[in-house]
Structures are given as structure tokens and as C-alpha cells.
Image: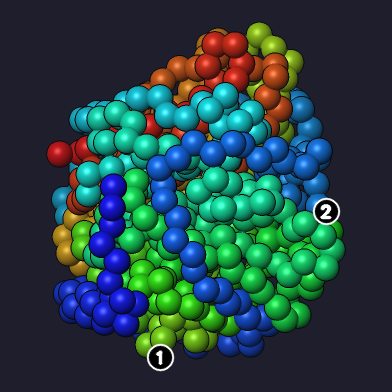
Amino acid sequence: MKLRHWPVAVVAGLITSILVVPVSSAAPAAQSSGTAIAPGGTGAAAPRVAQARGAAGLVAPPAGRDHAPLGLNGRPATEGLPAAVPKVAKPAPSAIGKSAGAPNSVTAPRPLTPPGTTNANFNGINQSAGGGAQPSDVNAASGATQIVETVNRRFTVYNKTGTQQCTNTLAGFLGATEDVFDPRVQYDNVNDRFSMVVTLTPTSGTAAAALYVAASQTGDACGGWWVYRLTFNGSLYPAGTLLDYPQLGQDRVALLLSSNNFHPSFINAAAFSISKAQVYAGASVSFPAFSVSPTTQPATVGGNPMPATTNSYFLASVAGTGYRLYRMTNSAGPGTTLTLQATVSSTFAVPPRQVNQPGVTTKLDPSDGRIVWSPYQVGNFIWFTHGIAIGSFPGIRYGAIRLSDNAPFVANAFRSGTSDDFNPSIGVSDADGGGASNYIWLNWAYTDTTNNIATSVTVDGVLPGGGVPNLVGTGTVLVNGAATTTNTRFGDYSSVSVENTCTAVVAQQYFATGGNWATRIGRLSFC
């Protein structure tokens, strides 16, 4: 396919005019002043043009490299979790009431329900096509006509029913000579563009810290992309720093990113944003970066189309405490200031042990209580999900933080009283145009040794007006998988990509017969 290329200045003008189209949205909530954070580094890059179609050779990772988020000791995050602890029955979930000002509670009460319509349910990239990398780190973004799936070492584009449109390795697509991994992808429904972040292993201790960021030049993910190899400097980024576990979100004007930084053990975490107008036009970029808590996630602004917002938000879960909520002000340009708005009190414990599988002794990784996928900013709330301990079982917490007063609203989710539940992601749509009434998708994996159920994928949900209820055994199971003895890592994140008010695309890992990982993509609707 030949793409029409316009001069950068012309494209920049077009993109800028698109980005400033006014969209009605709820009035911004009052904000607590918080604590301002000074920049601790900068990043910059000029782009190159890449073509998505291709089948370049795989780039093997360095010996011993585990494609997984590292804990603060520089080792896999949950390596220290015990394989087993004495089982304690899960506590019975208490009813979650609804009150004025609570999230998703403005209409009459609605029954719990999963998304009732499965429009598509198909296998995505598997371990063989992914070049053998462990784990998959699967995620997907749904555009106007395409679904883009990324895993470690490969990305593939499908139509909405699962027919492959094009595929390429990450290294071949990016033009990378380093080992590249931890890809994340999203879709901008205002400008009809896909964007992606991918990290890399530094080639030497003197190399500048770097990340790849890419954005499609049109809504066709099989066409041309702008590819940036961002390089960083400053106190947050000593030479040779690995920018591990990069995160990706967005608001109307900026791509929102963060990373955990290692040199060689954990030294800090950083957050920053990049102008969409510059990236979409293929212009050079530069920006400040700010110190944040480990695994601080940028929140994606939800809405169809995505509304304009005064502030962007980043959120980190902190075991034993609750959450750290950061506010980035975009009124004077993307990422000009960052403020710790609040430390939110809502205590939880991390998953107490590794995940059991029926019939085998190999355990899986439930992660360590970090938020593993982008939260959603919808109206006056930031919605999120992560793993927790429910009794002696790995389980799921989800909920929202009210931005006007930093109040948390949380609930639990699990498949059964004997299931191990892990690797969650969430998606939230704005059902009433003001962010107070929402459709909610919650996607996670589970096993249930008591009932001989191996790795399986489930999606649950809440209708507008349903509040924040506990979700227990009410979801739709997309696929039941097998047990594995060959994979010791489970995917460190999954995804929910909201397509329109009542439809979303979910992506999750499971294990196929034979023990290799496979991925499952579902397109599910409430309407």
C-alpha cells in the first residue's frame, strides 16, 4: 500500500485543529492542591518511518533475560511469593451500597451481568509466533475497523472478526537491533490513530536510557507509522538504565507514559507525556520527566469521542496503604507540571502465594498487587483494578477514586470460592455523557484446582447504575485452557480496549494443550 505523505507543517496544522475541537464534558471537579514534583530528567527524539507489513527475523533476547516486570530487588516481582500457604476460606463478600456521589450510581439499581453479546472470540498470537518469549504480555487495541494485538516480539493486525490483516516482529517493525519487549498499544478515537510503547535492553552500561514510541500515520495499522527511539538524560536516567515495564495511556492532547528504572537494581520510577500533535505529524519531540512511585500507571481518558480534560492522572497501588494519585496539568501544554494530589487510604494485601494449577506442581505468577494495565478516567472518577489477597487466595480488587475529594470505592472479584484469580484489566465507558453512569468490563484469568479447571479467561461487567458491586461467579468464560509445566511466568498484563459506549475488546493469556501460552481476544457488548 502506498501512503500519501504531506509536509510536516501541513500535517501539524491539521492535527492541531483536530485536537482542539471542543467536546462537551462534565465540569472539572475541584482539586486538592497536593505536592508539586520537580522534573528529574528529559527525553527527546526525532522519528523514522516504518511499515507495519513484514516478516523480519526474530531478535533473540540476551541469555537469561526474563520478559517480566522486575521487583524492587531487580528480580521478577513475585519470585519471593510462597508456592503454598494453608488455605483459608474466602470471606463472604459484603454488599456494596450505592449513595449520592458514588461512581456509577445515578440511575435505578441494575442487576449484575456480564456483557451479554459476544461479537467475536478468537485465538490471537501464540508462543510459537511470538518467538518463544515468556510471558506473552498480551494486549490489544480496537480501532474503527481493526484490532491490533501485541505480545513480546510480535504484533498482528486483525479485522473485527479475527481475520489476520498483517503481522510483523517488533524488532523488524521498529528497526531495532536490541532486544525489545513489554509492548503496549492503544487507539485514539478522536484522531483515528494507534500508538505503542516498547522498551529495550541497553546494549552497554554507557548507552543512554531509551524507549521506542510509535504512532500510526492513519487509522490503518497495516500502513505507515512514525517510530521514535526516545533517549533520556538527567538524574532519573543514568547511562545504561533499563526502562522496564513501560506504561501507556492517553488524554485528548498527549500520550501518557511511565516506567520503572533499573541500574542494575531498581533506582526510581518516572512519568512523562508527549504531545500527540507532534507525534502524529512526525515532528521531533522533547519533554520533562517526573519521579513517581513504582509502577505508576497513566490513566486513559474514556469517552466516545474522548473528551477534552484539564488534567491527566497517574495512579499507583501501594500495599498496606492504598493508592498514590498524581495529577498532570495540560493547560499550558502536555506534561508541564506533575503534582502528588493525594495518598488515598484503602488498605490491601498483595496476593499471598503463587497460583495453583490442577494436576501439576508448577505454579503461576499473580503479580505483586501493582496495577498492571491503564486505569480509566471517566468524569469525576479514576477506575482501576489489581491483584490482592482474598483470604489465602490470589484475588481481584477493582473500583474508583473520586477526584473531587480523593474518596475510594472498591469491591472484590473472583470466579468461585476455590479459584485463584489474577492478571486483571478494566475498561469503562461513559454511558450518560457526564461520566456518572458507566458500562464496566473486568477481564482476568483464573484457575480452580478444586474443580479441575486450568487457566481460563473470564470477563465480567456492571451495567449503568450498578455502582461498584462485588463480582463473584457471574462472568462470561471466553476459553478454558490447559495446565502447563513448561511456562513458569504468566502474562504480566492483559487489556480492555473500549470501542464504543457498550462494546469493548479484551485480550488475555491462557495455556493451550501442550503447555505453551496462547492468547484470546474477545469483542463483547452489553447492547
Q: For mark 1, give the secondary structure.
A: loop
The tally of labels here is: 2
Residue 63: image quadrant is: top right
* Amino acid type, callout 2: Asn
The C terminus - image quarter: top left
In the figure, 60 relative to 340: above or below? above
Q: In this view, does 364 lie to the left or right of 428?
A: right
Which three-letter amino acid code belongs to the residue tagged 1? Ala
What is the secondary structure assignment of the residue under circle 2?
A: loop
Q: Residue 332, which numbered label?
A: 1
Q: Which residue is drawn at 61% across and 16% down?
A: 515
Work out whether 330 lies above or below 68.
Answer: below
Q: Residue at x 19, y 55 (%)?
A: 431
Q: Is residue 308 visible?
A: no
Given residues 119 and 463, the one toward you in this image is 119
Compared across the picture, whether 298 is left or right of 441 comes to right
Point 37% across, 37% down: residue: 166
Q: Percent from the top left, x then y, of residue 81? A: 77, 37
**Residue with the mark numbered 2:** 73
